[in-house]
Amino acid sequence: MNTTLLMPQAGLVMVVDDDRLIRRMLVRELEAHGFEVKEAATGADALLQLEQNSVELVLLDVCMSEMDGFETCRRLRAMPRFRMLPILMLTGLDDIESIANAFDAGATDFITKPINLPLVSERVRYALRTHQMARELAFNKQLLSHANKLSGLGHWQLNLVNRTIEFSVEAKKIMGLRTKKGFIPLERLLKLLHPDSRIKMEQMLIQMEKGRRSASMDLCIRPGCVRERHVRVHAELMGLDAEMALDLVLGTILDITDDKRKENLIKHQALHDELTALPNRHMFKEHLLQAITTAEHKGELLGLLFINLDRFKVVNKTLGQALGDELLKVVAARLLSCVGSYNTVARLNGDEFSIILQGIEGRKDIALIADAIVETISETYILDDQEAVISPSIGISVYPQDGAEPDGLMRNADMAMNQAKESGGQRYNFCNAELNAATSARLSMEIALRRALEHNELILHYQPQIDLRSMSVVGVEALARWQNDELGDVPPFKFIPIAEESGLIHPLGEWVLHTACATVADWHARGLTSLRVAVNISPVQFRRDCLVKRIENALAATGLEARYLVIEITESLAMEDVKRSERVLSLLREQGIRIAIDDFATGHSSLRYLQHFPADELKIDREFIRWLGSSPTDTAIVQTVISLGHNLELEVLAEGVETKEQCAFLKKHGCDLVQGYLFSRPVDADDLFNMLMCPDSLITSYLNQGTVIGKKSAHAIA
């Protein structure tokens, strides 16, 4: 027995579209589901290929420049061997006139744009199966009857003269008809159809009365009822002999209710967030575009809210992912309760939501809703007997003032949301042009910094550190510098925070560490032995568990001995997590790496903890050195820190030394090390190497500034 009716095999399909991107997307989708695919960029190319090779189905775009889909379809139908070929039109034109034109041209079915790719292969497979069944029907009615019983396929015939339709037993079951008569009036059938389906059916019949030979379509029967069914109907125009009028339509009917449910499920999953069932980012963008179009047409305002949950990551980590997901569901429900059904609430990703407010009279209306959202979302959550508290940061943009296109509105709402979060959260911010300009500049700098790292645009400068007892250079501090063609010289206080916020601090920090170690190792080999190099570690780097390993790798890769590397961390960072700081610093110290506590006396140190820290140096912040001698308070602090450091058996380094008076004071009171403009600004590696190898150059610098240091050789390295 021929079993091809049961499981249609993937066949040869031709895709005709002058849009290369859409064509390639369709080809990949079909090939992924086992179809062999040919492609044509124009209708003329398709006709030429089909004259030489046969295919089993054609996907044909309606809108093509040289020859549109309607004309291409008409020419195919004019060829005898392609009169029954399934032709699926790809079009976004779903009006009645377009449907009629397509039927006139001979199209079999439609796939509307925008194309839902996961459904394409299924629609093609169904079209092939329907066509295959209809073709078998025309040649072998007995085989068709046998197949009907096995596959649940029904058949019917329509008399175009008296407009009566007769159904097989299986077709009656599918249609839910209980009549004992062999036929029913066509009008009765039409009343069972959904209004859209009724129009499609009537259009098909009109075309068949004009001589159209075949057609396929999906119809909805008994819409809204418990017995609502979705069916796929295929029709063929028949005649008793060649000289008689073609007044009989034979067709098949296939129950595709389950398939339609799966199709709707795929659509829903493609357009909705799985966790909250809210529209996802893709559907949100479609709704936003529609809302803008409506607002423009009616001359109304439109409010766009971007919402981020403050501290959600902390709460999610504390509660666990399962309860974190439940929390997001409750948040979604609360957001829906704050806005009317006319408005759209979407989940964009993670803990970010968005709301489209339509029919707004002014900003006051938006502010009232935003206030309600802040209050509602900030209420306590009870999840599995556990309490949780979160709050929203809301950014608001208004159409058309803050943007006439979706991307502009979304970008401005997002920036306003970030501004609300940076202001402490649990609040809303309207779009602010001045702040947005600053945010855009910050984003531009981040992009430029990323590019600078990729193209090695950054350099390291080094500032010497002087031992006041031996009057010799004992070390250098490595400092990152960035010179950009568009931005000019970008100071570290501008680009380092951006690097930390964006995560670029990790590649930047590794580059600084490797470069500094490699440079000093090279200096050692060239005669500047025993010179140390200090490298600053940012809080973001320090919090990474792999910090110790990365420092070990840098030393191993460059050949620098651990005792010549100084790792600098700030006082506040050391106190942030005392136990972790002590553990990490101890691991570094065990390898011989020196530890310096930077910016000392600017934070909130606990002397009880400080005495247990595995440190080697205290660095006095430059702000205290600046007012040394003129500010009794700062002078006392400097003296106290020097004394404290020595009592803790630590070396004390003062940075920012610019005058001979500052240097004389520090030397008098026992400060061990100094660095600052009095001796040298931070300079590039080659300049500093030459300076250290040529004592006169540095001595001349000292004498020009009248330093009290004297003429002792400055390049002597302790």
Image (cartoon, grey):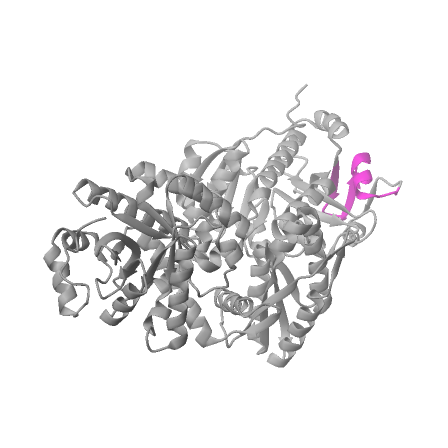
In this picture, is 301 found above or below 227? Answer: below
Q: Quadrant of the N terminus?
A: top right
Residue 171 falls inside the magenta stretch? yes
Q: Quadrant of residue 7?
A: top right
Residue 131 in view (yes/no) = yes
Of 154 and 317, nearer the camera is 317
Residue 716 falls inside the magenta stretch? no
Of 333 and 91, nearer the camera is 333
Q: Residue at x 12, y 63 (%)?
A: 700
**Residue 644: percent from the left, percent from the top?**
42, 60
Of 306 and 186, nearer the camera is 306
What is the tally of numbered marks visible in this picture? 0
Residue 23 in view (yes/no) = no
Q: Residue at x 77, y 44 (%)?
A: 165
Of 23 and 378, nearer the camera is 378
Q: Residue reaching furthest top?
A: 1
Q: Residue at x 18, y 51 (%)?
A: 716
**Residue 364: percent from the left, percent from the top?**
63, 81
Q: Which residues are magenta?
A: 155-179
Q: Residue at x 69, y 47 (%)?
A: 322
**Residue 586: percent from the left, percent from the top?**
46, 44
Q: Tell me if 156 is positioned left or right of 715 in this view.
A: right
Q: Tell me if 652 is positioned left or right of 242 in this view.
A: left
**Residue 330: percent from the left, percent from the top?**
72, 58
Q: Quadrant of residue 564?
A: top left
